[in-house]
Image (spheres, rainbow, N blue to C red):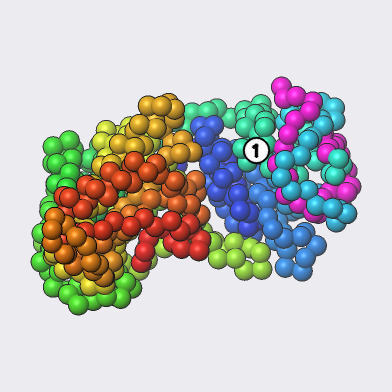
Amino acid sequence: MSQSALPDQRVIVVDFGAQYGQLIARRVRDLHVYSEIVPCDITADEVRAMAPAAIIFSGGPASVYAEDAPTIDPAILELGIPVLGFCYGQQIMAVTLGGEVGHTEKGEYGPAPLTRCGESALFADTPGEQTVWMSHRDAVSRVPEGFAVTSRTDVCPVASMECAERRLYATQFHPEVRHTAFGNELLANFLFGICGLVPDWTMDSIIEDSVAAIREKVGEDRVILGLSGGVDSSVVAALGARAIGRQLVCVFVDHGLLRKGEPEEVEAVFTEQFDVDFIRVDARERYLELLAGVSDPEEKRRIIGTQFWKEFFAVAQQLDGVKYLAQGTIYPDIIESGARKTGGKASTIKSHHNLIPFPEGVSFELIEPLDHFFKDEVRALGTALGLPDHIVHRQPFPGPGLAIRIIGDVDAEKLEVLKSADAIVREELDAYNERLFQETGVRDSERSVWQYFAVLPDIRSVGVMGDERTYARPIILRAVESQDAMTADWARLPYEVLARVSSRVVAEVPGVNRVVYDVTSKPPATVEWE
């Protein structure tokens, strides 16, 4: 099997370096058809071996006439597989098949009014006039022989083209972007009307296929998993429990750097809800000793990561019959590990988990059952497997844990202060988000806070508590809104929420006399402080 169970019916997205490459794959999956991304230098023979039911060419930033412009194996267009190209994908289809692309006098960026020209299976059941999302200066000026122009805009005379006989379709605009009013309908028309696919890639089928694949691969052997309590490793554990039960050994290394109550929550879930072999390693004192006096964040990360593997393999070497190591690798990890661009071409997509520091004489075969799933699909999978919301919808949390939310060195006192303050922050902003949901009926409204936590800086400040002067620690509140995690804006929290957080932290957390709010966006800042 592959690292994950893949359905027979699939769509491949040929990536020309598009900013929307992953988005295209996501939109196809939203229509319950499995899709995956491949580099643009894939050959026709490689495509044939994958046996996709359909191919989509992504957009890309290059000009088709640039010296280092990405190209495509022309034989791909002769395989008889339906192809749909977007933006650069339309242009590369045109020039490969003998058409021409020209440099328009003015670019077209953002929403544009489009007019259909004649009948088209791609545009079936969509209006004659509609709004699409454009982002180009180059455009097709002459379509290849056998192609018909199916739409235009005021700037772009070939907003889309097709050769229905060869099942080749293309648009200059981006149907995958929500701003294209009928983009979803166009994708559905291509997948179901033109390609004849069936929307059967559902959560039930994913679980069924994944469980069968794990059972087939593992047989009677045992699998070990480093369980962090995060979304990805927890979903792997739940999936493994469904597939092989107590053949799965979950090793939870408690380094003492998780948020308040989380170690107990993780243990409760995987000892009470799931039938796996759960081992909790109490490494809190060892981590504190190693981190004592260490202020550099990169050194903290190195120490924490190195010690994790030491703790993990110390357990692994005591177990019999373990042949496999399960990992919570997800699809963006795989894509990003092969995302280097050379001359406009994406390098081959491959796993980045070949740097696991196996001790001498120790090795396991990898099982990565989530390696073809995006994050929201992993969350949906977790819910379907019965994981509780506090794990499935866990906020982003750095691998080194609270150690990098403590500025400066880490000790037991600072950890206790930060855990207590952070628990109050999360409790109050959880409640705020829930109130928004009750008011709007939308779980992630524009006013919802995406991520929120406390930071403990390496300073003290003067305060007055009661009739006494204090010299105690401040807590920094960080709360941001984001749609894509690439950029973030500080959350405009109501004053009453800020006041409640501040008064509770100062009143309930010993050693804190001040709360400040970080009002810096990303960029120029990052979400985390270190």
Is residue 400 among the parts visible in the rendering? no
Front residue of 529/150: it is 529
Which percent across, then down, holds residue 126? 72, 25
Residue at x 66% of width, y 64% of height: 344
**Which residue appears at 58% of the width and 30% of the height?**
197
Give the quarter of the figure containing the C terminus: bottom left
Residue sitting farthest toward the top: 125
Residue 133 is a magenta residue? yes
Name the main secondary structure of what is drawn in magenta.
strand
Horizontal side, residue 130 vs residue 414: left or right = right
> Which of the 4 image quadrants contains residue 5?
top left
Q: Residue 103 versus residue 5: which sits nearer the camera?
A: 103
| Left or right of residue 40: residue 306 | left
| Start-end of magenta stretch | 125-153
What amino acid is labelled 1 in the image?
Answer: His
Point 34% across, 33% down: residue: 434
Work out which residue is located at the far front of the displayed protein and give it.
467
**Foreground: 225 or 105?**
105
Dot 1, how many residues are within 10 Å of its Cα: few (below 14), some (14-19), or many (20+)?
some
Q: 245 or 303, which lies in front?
A: 303
Where is residue 380, by image quadrant? Answer: top left
Query: Residue 133 lies in what quarter of the image?
Result: top right
x, y percentage for residue 306?
A: 25, 70
Can I make out residue 174 in this image? yes
Q: State the image coordinates of residue 162 (x, y, percent, origin top left).
A: 79, 37
Q: Which residue is mark 1?
A: 179
Q: Inspect the magenta stretch and tell me whether residue 370 lies in it.
A: no
Q: Residue at x 37, y 43 (%)?
A: 495
Q: Is residue 101 above or below residue 32?
A: below
Task: Count numbered badges in the picture.
Answer: 1
